């Protein structure tokens, strides 16, 4: 998986890396149980501070996306629960409240917003049908 960091973006680098790893899991680019690069290797590969990568990996671990083993390193959680839970829906609802508010304030119509959501969702849904 190739990460693309926009250094001039307002989105913090750690958030860009984290988001791209989660998207990679959803798209099937990163498989359950797949080993990720070491903190040092990923930092060197994309030209960022190793503490930033460490922060990303620890956040991904606390959210259950990855597991970290002292000897074998970081891997996509092989037991990742991809099933819907009420807690996941609550978290998603909170995120969507902010995204919807920003969209509204930026003048994006409801139809445009729904089209964007459907198009993005379909990218992940197509992966499951393969």
Image (cartoon, grey):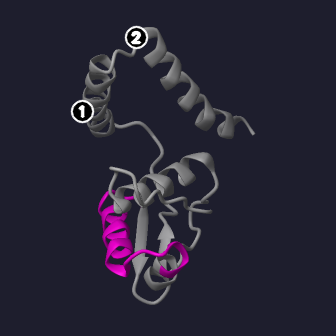
> Which image quadrant is residue 113 in?
top left
The chief SS type of the magenta part is: helix
Q: Which mark is residue 7?
A: none
Q: Residue at x 30, y 70 (%)?
A: 55
**Left of 6 or right of it: where is 95?**
left
The residue nearer to you, when weighing 107 against 63, is 107
Magenta stretch in the rendered image: 44-65
Q: Residue at x 56, y 74 (%)?
A: 35
Q: Is 84 above or below relative to 46?
A: above
Residue situated furthest bottom in the rendering? 71
Q: Residue at x 55, y 47 (%)?
A: 26
Residue 129: % across, % down = 71, 35
Lower position in the chain sequence, tag 2 or tag 1: 1
> Which image quadrant is residue 61 in?
bottom left
**Left of 84 or right of it: where is 101?**
left
Q: Mark 1 falls on what kind of element? A: helix
The residue nearer to you, when weighing 108 against 74, is 108
**Left of 74 or right of it: where is 122?**
right
Crowding around mark 2 (Cα neighbors within 10 Å: few <14, some 14 to 19, many 20+) is: few
Crowding around mark 1 (Cα neighbors within 10 Å: few <14, some 14 to 19, many 20+) is: few
Q: CA distance from mark 2 to mark 1?
A: 20 Å
Q: Which mark is residue 94?
A: 1
Residue 17: % across, % down = 44, 60
Residue 15: % across, % down = 36, 56
Magenta stretch holds residue 130: no
> Which image quadrant is residue 54 in?
bottom left
Residue bearing mark 2: 109
């Amino acid at each position: 998986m190739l990460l693309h960091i926009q250094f001039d973006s307002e989105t913090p680098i750690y958030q860009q890396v984290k988001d791209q790893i989660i998207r990679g899991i959803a798209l099937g680019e990163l498989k359950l149980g797949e080993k990720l690069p070491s903190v040092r290797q990923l930092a060197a590969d994309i030209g960022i501070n190793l503490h930033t990568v460490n922060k990303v990996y620890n956040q991904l671990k606390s959210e259950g996306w990855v597991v970290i083993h002292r000897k074998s390193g970081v891997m996509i959680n092989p037991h990742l629960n991809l099933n819907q839970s009420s807690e996941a829906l609550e978290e998603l609802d909170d995120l969507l409240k902010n995204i919807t508010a920003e969209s509204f304030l930026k003048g994006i119509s409801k139809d445009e917003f729904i089209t964007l959501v459907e198009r993005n969702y379909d990218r992940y849904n197509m992966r499951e049908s393969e």
